[in-house]
Amino acid sequence: MSKLNGNIRIGVYVCHCGTNIAGTVDVAAVARAAAGFPGVAVSREYKYMCSDPGQELIVKDIREHNLNRIVVASCSPLLHEHTFRTAVEKARLNPYFTQMVNIREHNSWVHQEKGAATEKANDLVRAAVRRVACHKPLEKSRVPIDPAVLVVGGGIAGIHAALTLANSGKRVYLVERDATIGGHMARFDKTFPTLDCAACILTPKMTAVKAHPNITLWTLSEVSAVEGYVGNYEVAVTRHPRFVHEDLCAGCMQCVEACIYKKPKYEDEFNYGLSKRKPVYLPFPQAVPQVVVIDPEDCIEFKSGACKKTCVEACGDRHAIDFEMTDWTEKIKVGTIILATGFQAFDPKRIPYYGYGTYPNVYTSLEIERLVNAAGPTGGEVVLRDGKSTPRSVGIIHCVGSRDETTNRWCSRVCCMYSLKLAHLIKEHTDAEVFNFYIDIRTPGKGFEEFYQRLLKEGVHFIRGKVAEVTDWALDPSEEGKLVIRVEDTLSAFVRRIPVDMVVLALGLEPHADAQEVRRRFNITCSTEGFFLERHPKLAPVNTFTDGIFLAGCCQGPKDIPDTVAQAGAAAAEALVLIDAGYVETEPNTAYVLEEECSGCRTCITLCPYRAISHVEAKQKAEINPVLCKGCGTCVAGCPSGSIQQNLFEDEEIFEEIAGVLNYVR
Amino acid sequence: MSDDKFEPRIVAFFCNWCTYLAADAAGVSRMKYAPNARVVRVMCSGRIDPQFILDAFAKGADGVLVGGCHPGDCHYQEGNYKALRRVILLKRILKEMGIEEERFRLEWISASEAERLKSTMNDMVEKVRALGPLRLNTAAIFDEKEVAVL
């Protein structure tokens, strides 16, 4: 322990965290043991170290006992490292003279036997004490923030975040993959529980996006590459061709009328294939931008090159239509990014025994949203696939692709409420008998339970049971020509067969098929089920583990519109915090070269993915640019002569930590 | 210490962005696993110098576990590949030294894989327990000075 030359005075603070730690770890014993470790001048235990009095304790001790190193044994450093560094700084000590020991997440919460947990805590504290003695004073560096923001995804989350930021005067790039913004919400009829018209509340926001001088809206576009770091991201956006120049198209729709296809022939994606469109079309009447799009898969000109191009003729002098358009890339610089990429609905074909795609009159909940919509393919008439008969009985099956061990285990949160809403709307439109087949009815939200009670009074039937099967196999004449729902009614404890005309599958929400690809592109993490992972489920619900990248809406997990809008506002606020601060402080865990020892072998140069290391010809030495270095430490481990070190993770510090946990004494 | 009471001592080097978070998540979910491992946090599995692993064995570890991000998922693009490269070489050296291969593991455990963290921990402890203590003749194999020059 030659390093402890008497100048090192360590304070050790062991937190009880109420009973979270103290319930499993003998904190008093840990504090006593720590008092005997070399260099420790003060060792204490306290109920809540992160509380104000807890932090004050450290500040006071630093002053009174002349401490110059602090070890806090409490929770994960990812939670409170910043808290304790700030406390230490308050006492005018360099904040990096602090080391945290994780005795909660990594110890008391995962172990049961008090003896073993206490022994582990002792080892970890010993390691931290030995490590912290080697700590050096470090300075944070400041990086300026580019005030522009990239918002990815133009559903209600992206729209709200973009407008919030733009209204506060920030430049926003809103990138949307589809030909129009609006996302899922644009397709909904009414919103629960107030039965507001979804389009009436959404479309004004959509036009506001287009009209806003601070928002650059790019539809049919995808982020293809992200480089840089918080405050200074360089983003490449691939813009797919619309084959219509946005700035030249007036949205007159004459080309659509003039199209060589006299009748719409292709599946209309906006209506989930319930109606047809032409190869040139406007996604829906209130689409933003109000610009038509040509689908090259369907257009004759793309297939044969021999179309009469009546659309071009109709467009006339405007020359908006351009069959030669190809992908192009825009490069932008932004300081922060908000991901609002949304969800995809569960594919009901994954549950074949519910008959979607087999029996024509099995519908998805999204299709029903379009059917009950006055602007939908049937003008709001709920009719069966034959296009004329009105269903006299409808069964709504809840939790399709939710709360199911064989598909998705999570609750999709919105299905109970939207099923109630659809039940109400179907009843209103058709006066049919409506049956809800549910596992549990979940109505936690403002006005939700009241809406459920209202439905009960409206005479909608509720049958508690998970549907086993939808079949057209009739057992008696009353079932002929109907779809029979077989279900165990768990409240009356017998198996029922309920014949209906129409079955509605309440689809769950799941991550986009390419969510993993997207998360890699943005260097963020997914949770087990594949939704983007927030930094902390309670305290940092819109942050990610990558600084400067925030989450909004269903890409983080299923949620309803009010929650989505709230989260989008929060994400915008988090971005504004960074932008208005003007700079961001970066962790000084960068690597540096010990020049006198560097042989100039250049091994490190190829190891660095950020090209932060260069070879200085004049000196024949490596040099690390601290601005480019992100502090992974790969070069440090790779240097054959040990002449690169990493701040906060110096070899010496880690060796001391290893010796500490193993209680190794020479 | 008699062998039936033997508690393996495991040193674990975890990447800050994946396995360390998985261990945090295991804690938040109150999963229970063997208390034998002591975690040393690094920013990336690429920071893990083979010396750290040798040093841990020399100082009395019965097993060493390295946790990094899945291939393609490195927070720093490719540090985990560098770690893998080093680990493959190191495993050959450890074999030469007579250290059983179950004593040293590299695992890819993402932030969301708390369950995997738990089972890896338990599995490793059981395997090392079955092997018994690592009785290295450290004086013969690890000359402190030699390790220092490495």
Image: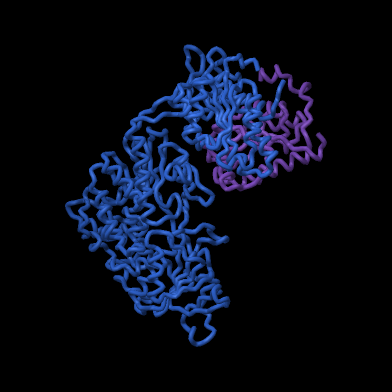
Chain colours: A blue, B purple
Q: Where is residue A570 in the image (x, y as percent from the top left)?
A: 37, 45
Q: Where is residue B122 in the image (x, y as percent from the top left)?
A: 69, 44
* Residue extending farthest bottom: A477
Look at the image and tell me in which quarter the C terminus of chain A lies: top right
User: In the image, is A606 to the left or to the right of B9?
Assistant: left
User: In the image, is A320 to the left or to the right of A588?
Assistant: left
In this picture, is A343 found above or below A127? below
Tell me if I can see residue B81 in this picture: no
Look at the image and tell me in which quarter the N terminus of chain A lies: top right
Q: Where is residue A415 in the image (x, y as percent from the top left)?
A: 44, 63
In this picture, is A299 found above or below B51? below
* Residue extending farthest left: A317
Front one among A55 and A281: A55
Q: Residue at x 44, y 42 (%)?
A: A540
Q: Where is residue A412 in the image (x, y as percent from the top left)?
A: 47, 58
User: In the image, is A275 to the left or to the right of A308?
Assistant: right
